[in-house]
Image (cartoon, rainbow, N blue to C red):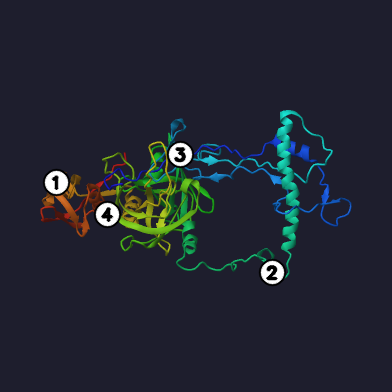
Amino acid sequence: MTENDPGPKPAHDTGEPTPPNPWRATGDQAAHAADAVGAEDTWRRPGEPGRAELPPAPQGTPTYSSHGVYGTAQPGERVLFGSAFAEQPGGHPGGHPGGHGVDPGPGVPGYQQAGDTRTATANGPAPADAPKRRGVGGVVAGVTALALVVGGGAGAVGGYLVGESNSSAGQANALNTPAARQASGAPAPAGSVEAVAEKVLPTVVQLRVQGRSVSGEGSGFVISGDGLIVTNNHVVEAAASGGTITAVFADGAAAEATVVGRDPTSDVAVVKARGVSGLPTAELGSSEDMRVGQAVVAVGSPFDLAGTVTSGIVSSLHRPTRAGGAEGDQTTVLDAIQTDAAINPGNSGGPLVNMQGQVIGINSAIYSPTSTDTSQGGSVGIGFAIPIDQARRTADEIVRTGRATQTVLGVRVQNDPQGARIIEVTAGGAGEKAGIGAGDVVTKMDDRRIETSDALVAAVRSHAPGDKVRLQLSNGSTVDVTLAGQPVETG
């Protein structure tokens, strides 16, 4: 992936067909076994009264610890990705980058149901006068019975001998010791993932969205006791024009929510839960002093698995990332934090926090090389979050005014081997006022290298309107620019 590719897109979930189980014992086989072997165990242990004594096994005869139990269960149920993905009209999986969606329910692709387990059992060899089955069916039954009889007889010996050998006095046995337990009520160590989870989980919300033609699910976090919640724009945009949003809190309580405002260019939105008060709120940190390699924790509802905690590190900073949009569309280019903490569809809008439990980013997108327009990928260890400094500025403006302002340079750009080439300058914009012209190539903004057009867009949006920056051009000259702002249109 290059930084000027469409970038990480919201992954779309794809199902796996359930493979057949060639190892299941059938009911007929079990019946043949019972018919051929009989219902009574005619053997006994040495010295046991009333039955014939079990003859010793010949030298070299294998022993088994199980008493003639055959047949294997199907593989156990495995939920590949939980159940969250976007459901488009007609039942085709779809969704937005970062992922959210509805529960497809059991039995659909992506789930493997647990099969029934049938076993054939035998308690010993058949009596000598047992009736023999005739014909082809009798041959098959006889083969089955032979296998079961071998297992049953040898199993009795093996089980007895193993039991004898394990009764040696003075040998330590973990099964005979009490279960070790953590000290009741012991606090989690400061700075541990456990301590972070205890602090952050009560502030994280699952958002269930119902639009006119699509349903979805994502995450958010509470910023005020009366129900203000920060999330991604792409999580709630389906409900922005006539849909519904349900906020499900950590204690399971649910409340209807409405959109306060949203900004597609920064992928930030604020919603308000109705009729709530006294909610625990997230602590906001700063993304300015983050370092590559520092530990982080992501919290959210990946694939509808609410309250999921994953951990990792900051893999990179200032990563230009398109959180959706068509190829060539720079509307949603983010100046993102890259992390290897597992982020999946449904994590969108949830917090990325430091080891003090402070929010430093909003999980927004993943890089999924196997995803397509009709399939949803999962985490490959490359996730992206919006830096909280940028998100906080946008959320605060939305709460105060209901709208967001986008930081702009007033130019259009395209890739150039040396950086970002200016192809158009907006009349009266910040770029024109600073003396930038079409054909100029920007190679640096302040101390930050600009290698692509997306890198320049991301660098501009990391600032606030009114900030002053210095641009270095490919011809060696520098230009000082005061960045401008423009209202964001939400459509």
Q: Earlier in the sequence, mark 4 or mark 2?
A: 2
Residue found at x 38% / y 53% = 362
- The answer to whether one can see residue 279 in this image is no
- 409 or 168, which is in the foreground? 168
Q: Earlier in the sequence, mark 1 or mark 3?
A: 3
Identify which amino acid the numbered label 4 is placed on: Ser
Q: Which residue is mark 3?
A: 14
| Horizontal and vertical percent position of residue 361 | 37, 56
Badge number at residue 171: 2
Q: Dot 3: few (<14), some (14–19), or many (≥20) neighbours within 10 Å? A: many
Asked if one can make out residue 71 in the rendered structure from this viewpoint, the answer is yes
Report the Cα–Cα distance between label 1 and label 3.
48 Å
Q: Looking at the image, how many numbered discs can be counted on the residues?
A: 4
Query: Residue drawn 13% across and 53% down?
Result: 473
* Amino acid at circle 2: Gln
Query: Of circles 3 and 2, which is in front?
Result: 2
For the residues bearing labels 4 and 3, Cβ distance under 8 angstroms: no
Mark 4 and mark 1: Cα distance apart in space: 22 Å
Q: In front of the other: label 4 or label 2?
A: 2
Q: Nearer the viewer, residue 17 or 255?
A: 17
The span from disc 4 to disc 2 (Cα, nearest Å) is: 66 Å
Q: Earlier in the sequence, mark 3 or mark 2?
A: 3
Q: Nearer the viewer, mark 4 or mark 3?
A: 3
Q: CA separation, marks 1 and 2?
A: 88 Å
Task: Tell me the tag on residue 428.
Answer: 1
Secondary structure under tag 2 reads loop
